[in-house]
Every structure is written in C-alpha cells, then in structure tokens.
Amino acid sequence: MSQETVSGAQALLRVFEEENVDVFFGYPGGAVIPIYDALYDAENIRGVLPRHEQGAAHAADAYARVTGKVGVCMATSGPGACNLVTGLATAYMDSVPMVAITGQVKTNLVGMDSFQEADVTGITIPITKHNYLVKEPYQIERFPDLVREAFYLAQNGRPGPVLIDIPFDVSAGPIAWAERNIKALDGYEEPQVPAEADIDRAAELIETSERPVIMIGGGVASSDAHEEIRELAEKCNISVVHTLMAKGCFPETHELSMGMPGMHGMSYASYAIQNADLLIVIGARFDDRITGDLSRFAPDADVIHVDIDPAEIDKVRPASVGIAADAKTATAAINETVGRRERGEWEDHLKQFKTEHALAYSDEDELMAPQFVVEKLYEVTGGEAIITTEVGQNQMWAAQYYPLEEPRRWCSSGGLGTMGYGHPAAVGAQIGRPDDLVVDIAGDGSIQMCMQELTTGVIHNLPYKIIILNNSYLGMVRQWQDMFFNKRYSGVDLHGNPDFVKLAEAHGAVGLRCDERESVVETLEQAMEVEDRPVMVDFIVAKEENVFPMIPAGQSFDEIIECPIGDDTE
Amino acid sequence: MTEMEMQRTISVLVKNRPRVLARVAGLFARRGFNIDSLAVSTTESEAISRMTVATTCDLPTLRQIAKQVLKLHDVVRVIDHSESNIVERELCLIKVEVERGQRAELISLCDVFRGDIVDIGNGTVMVQLVGDKDKIDAFVDVMADYEIAEMVRSGKIVLDRGGQG
Ligand SMILES: Cc1ncc(C[n+]2csc(CCOP(=O)(O)OP(=O)(O)O)c2C)c(N)n1
Ligand SMILES: [Mg+2]
C-alpha cells in the first residue's frame, strides 16, 4: 500500500480527532496560519478564540480539570507562545493534562533571531512535562506519532502539559501519515502495579492505628479515585482531610470529612493531622502551604504515601510505606486487603473538636463580609456549581465556604497561585460542561488580569457568573501587611478600580452590583436567571476582612490563629 | 554514612537528542542540586549518550535527584553508583611553568604519580594524569609548588565493576 501524504497541519488535526479533541483554545498568527487553514476544513474540531493567549492556556486547563480529557491550546510563535507561559506553569504545578501547540519560524530561520522567533522549547522546559521542537528529520518522519506521544505523555503517569513547537514549513509541508499504535510509542509504559507486600503493610498499619487520618490531594481528582477513597473511609471509619486540589473528591458534608488543612484551612483539619498516629496520604505532595514547619508537622504520625510519581515519595516527608502507583488502583487494592475498623474514641473526639472549632467570621463592618456572599452563593446554587477561583482571599473563602460534594467541580490554581486564572477557567469549564452552572469566585484585583475574556464568553453565549468580592484591595497581600508588617499598606490599594458593571455591559455581558446584605440573595438569583451570556456581579464587601484560621508561613499548628468568635475581632 | 554529605556519583543514560543536556543540567539547577563535575560522552549504543554526574549530597538527596532525573522523557536510565564497586577515572592536563633546572625534579614527581609529560614548550611543561579524583587532587596539590599556568580536568567517568550495570 502506498503511503498517504498529508500536510503537517492536517496530520495534527487528524491526531486531534483520534484523541477526541473537539475543541481547542487558540490564537492565530503568522506561524500557525497553516494550522488554521487546515482547521477551515475540519468538521469535527472547533477553535475557540480567546482574547489573550493566557486565556487560551487557562481555558484549556480548566476544560481538562472538569472533563478529565486533555485540554488543548494553541498560539503563534514568539509573543503568542510567550503569552502561554503563565498558563503552562499553572497547569504544570497542578499536574493538569494539556497539549500546547505553538507555531515556530521556518526551520531554516530557527536560531537566527528571526522575526517573532523565541526559543519556546528552551523557555518551557521547566514548566512542561516534555516538549518538542519539530525540526529534525527523525521527528518530521514520525510526526503523527510524535503528536500522539504528546497526548500520551500529557495523560500517562503524573499528568502535565506537553508542548509541541512546530515550524511553519513543517505544518505547511508534506508528512507521511501513519496509523496509530499506542504501544509502539516512545515512552509507552505499562501502568505501575502496587506491590502486594506494600499493600499488606499499609493495611496492617491502618488496622493497628488508633488515630488514623486520610489526606487526599490532586492525584485523587486526576485519577478519579473518589469512590475508592469513600469506600476506604467508610469501611475503616477514618476521617478525611483534603488539600485545596482535592476539593470535592470526598463529600465535604460527609460526617467523616474533616475539611482542608494548612495555612488557611479549617483548624479541625490541621488538628486532626497534627494528632494523628497514621497519615494515609493519597495523591498529595506535602506542599509547604499544608505542612508549614515540616519538623513540627504531624509529629506522631506514621505515613503511608500513595503517589503515581515515585519522586514524590520521600521527597518532603519520609514514608513508612511508599506506594508509587495510581491513586485509584492503589486505594482499591488497600480496600480489598484491609479489615473493617470500627469507629473509636478518636473519631468521636474529632467530631466534637470540629463542632467546637467551626469556621466563623464576624459580620460587623458597615459593609457585608465577603464570606457572607459565598455562603449565600452556596445556598442559592444548592452547592451544585462548578467553581473556578481567582487567587487571594477570594480563593480561600471559596475553599472554606463553598463545600463541594463531587469531584471535577473545582478549578483553582493551587500550586502556582495564578491571579487571572479563574475567569478564563470559567470559559473553559463552561465549554467543557455546557449544562452545568459555572461560577468564578473572584477578587477585584485578579479579575482585571484576564478581563478581556468576557468577549469570549459573550460570543459563545456562555452563561457563567463572575462573583467579584470587591474589597478595593489586593486583599491577601494587604492581610500579610496588616498582620506581619505593622499595617504598612504598600502597593495594595485598588482605588481607581473600573466600574465593573459598565465594564461588563461594554463587553455585552450583564453587569450587576450589590452593596447590602439584604439584596445579596436577590442579586444572585437575578444573575442565575441569565442563560445566554456571562454575568459579572460586583459585590462591595468589607475592605479589611482577613482570612482565618491562619497558620503563618513556616509555622505549625501550635501557632494557629483561630477564627474570630463574636465581638473580639480587631 | 547515608546522612553524610559526600561526593556521590550517578550515571544518566539519555537518548541522543537535541537539548537533552540542557534538560538534565537545568533540572539540577532549578532543584538546587549542585554539579561538582559532569562528563558527557557517546556509549556502546549509537542512540544513547552517557552523562556522569558527581554531586555532593547525602543519600536521600541523591535518591531524590535520581528519581527526578528519571522523570525526564529523554532519560532512559539512571545508575546510582553510591553503593556499588566502581572504577572511577578522570583525566587531567596541567601546564606548569618550570625553569630549565627544575625539569628533572618535575619528571620524577610525574613518575611517582604515573603522569606523562605530553608537551614541553618555552618555560612550560604539560603533564597528563589519569586516575581517580583523590589521586588527581593530590597531584594538583604537589604541582602547586610550581606556577600552574593552566589546568583542565575532564570530570570523572565511572563504570560499575564486573558483570553488573
Ligand atoms: C499573577 C499574580 N501576581 C501577583 C500575585 C500575588 N498576589 C497573591 S494574592 C494577591 C491579591 C489578590 O487581590 P484580589 O484579586 O483583589 O483578591 P483578594 O485577596 O482581595 O480577595 C496578590 C497580588 C499572584 N498570586 N499572582
Ligand atoms: Mg481584592
């Protein structure tokens, strides 16, 4: 049979189809015109045009988080590709499966400081799982497989973004088409199976522990291990804490849920960890926002650590049992082996501690508390929204006051903490899950970083809601200055913010404003009624509300600052 | 011993591809692992290059380095030599300034270390020495009695002894 020849761009889109990519987020330019030209004829693939490449990357990222598929973004060479960088780093830190396609100058111009040339593979080595500059004959010859390999790498093992930098002449030029054979791909590996001995040892530790706690992280979300986690918790009556990344992977209203530990976590979550004699850590990596001072973190606990990335085991906290395997497979194996464990004194104690140390805020400012808005949002939406967040206090209040029952309903930049993430994430999430309610819980600072995506939302009739907790400050930074720098507020005052209502309207979206407690619910309901375009709601909230509890950076649970009770706030 | 910071060596077998050195070296840099010496060469297989990396750290850190490096897609295998029986070699070229009258003394020092004189120029002598790190360090110390004009070391290369590896 003679080999079929197609253009590089056509080959790329064909592999997209094989990989079930029906939509990608991309911004054109000279170096990707051949790809956009091929897209013109592609019937099953839609290119969504964001208004900034950063938006393309974040949208693809959130699309991946809510659908479980690979998110795809695209940009032209030089400036376009550079604009993807923040989004790639965000996805890399949170292990989100993504494929980024960038155009590059023609192969004979690479390395010549050509017009719109940037060394994109060089720039993105530290923030991608792998990347390719398709320039060498051996790569061009196997181009279809190279693209398949990128998709494979993005999803296999610990997920992450993979970038393919394609010179103009490669996407415009001829490529020998080749059929798919995943197992023949370079880098293909059989899934890691947990060793029986490790599972036995883990089961034994669980059975003999007196004060066990399960801590789940983003790995549980990416491997869809939520059911297995629930089975483990219920079978053995073990309380579950979740990191920011695992929000929704264990129902937060479940009686065994002990919330989110760490810097701004619930004090009962941190308390549980701190007093545990066994930590069963699944798909979490002991981030410093969780551990604080490592030498004083969970001092009495043995650790069972399940992570698909072997390098995470013993990286931060040495494990008694380290299991380098997929969270779902490993948890299922533990469930099969472990014996039932009855509810004990420890669980009762935790339950009581939890009620005594519930989240609280004082709503005594003339302006309403931002937490109040999130609580009302929870009520009005029945807790069923997909939540995206910006970064700062708004993100922490979203994590604290919007409990989730299901996985893949939470898109927040955990590892990198990227302001500007939430809005394009709402675009991507809404496109990935058109029938779900999507809400971006935003700060007045962050929302201005990717504001331009309102147009994308309007053009595609995306009915997501943006809830701005407008405190006229870069609130989280102001909080640190308040608490640790003698209230010397510097560079955090956002007076001069635009009129967000008018701004929404200028984009063709709906803008609403609310500055009194009494009309919060009504305003939210009004927002929910809009079905054909984005709504941005400007909630004017107390300017100097702080996020509590707080364990100051580098400290431990002993130094926790609890939520204010009653009047005794500042 | 495992907790002790000392020089430890790993070999990284990599696919022979553009930028692979940058990927490995960049990983060391961004994770704060220092590189004491690095040697890169071809191997028995055309498709594979071998990097020998010496780094000063404790054993847990070395293990972490090995695991991080292995995650790079172009890395095929990482060999941790810290607990194996190895042959370790390094090549040193050292050019010293010597008066005519000092040459005989220099030659006998070279004999002791089994160094070879590979060049004699006007006022300089170049010595080539092969050995493990300690031997070369010792020789360089001795040479410091003369004026060292220039020196280069290849970085160490290592193979496990016997039928392992
Ligand atoms: C891109 C980016 N720049 C700077 C920061 C540092 N930063 C973290 S939180 C924060 C304040 C965010 O302000 P706002 O969006 O108004 O949220 P608030 O804390 O007031 O809720 C800043 C500047 C960041 N995380 N990301
Ligand atoms: Mg703010």
Image (cartoon, coloured by chain):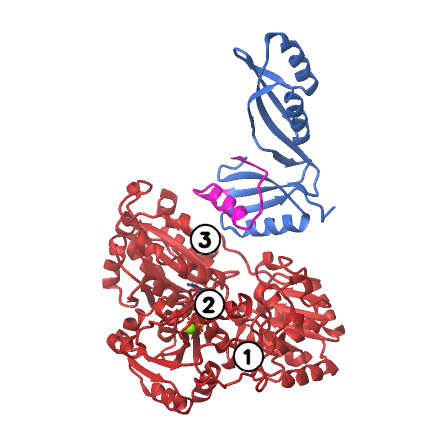
Chain colours: A red, B blue
N-terminal-most mark, 1 or 3:
3
- Residue linked to disc 3: A130
Please state if B125 lies on the left or on the right of A14 as rendered.
right
Disc 1 element: loop
- Where is residue A350, by image quadrant? bottom right
Query: Residue A391, how many percent across, how many down?
Result: 45, 69
Three-letter code, disc 1: Glu
Which contiguous range is marked in magenta?
A: B15-41
Q: Is residue A287 visible?
A: no
Residue drawn at x 53%, y 60% as measured from the top left: A157
Three-letter code, disc 3: His
Label 2 resides on the chain identified as: A
Q: Are marks 2 and 3 in contact (CB under 8 Å)?
A: no
Label 1 resides on the chain identified as: A
- Residue linked to disc 1: A570
Say whether residue A458 is magenta: no
Circle 2 packing at 10 Å, graded few (<14), some (14-19), many (20+), is some
Tell me the distance, in whole angstroms, between the alpha carbons under discs 1 and 3.
49 Å
N-terminal-most mark, 2 or 3:
3
Q: Is residue A9 above or below residue A236?
A: above
Looking at the rendered image, the quarter that the C terminus of chain A falls into is: bottom right
Query: Residue B62, how many percent across, how many down?
Result: 64, 48
Tell me the distance, in whole angstroms, between the alpha carbons under discs 1 and 2.
17 Å
Tell me the distance, in whole angstroms, between the alpha carbons under discs 2 and 3.
41 Å
- Residue linked to disc 2: A489
Q: Is residue B91 above or below residue B82?
A: above
Q: Is label 1 or label 3 in front? A: 1
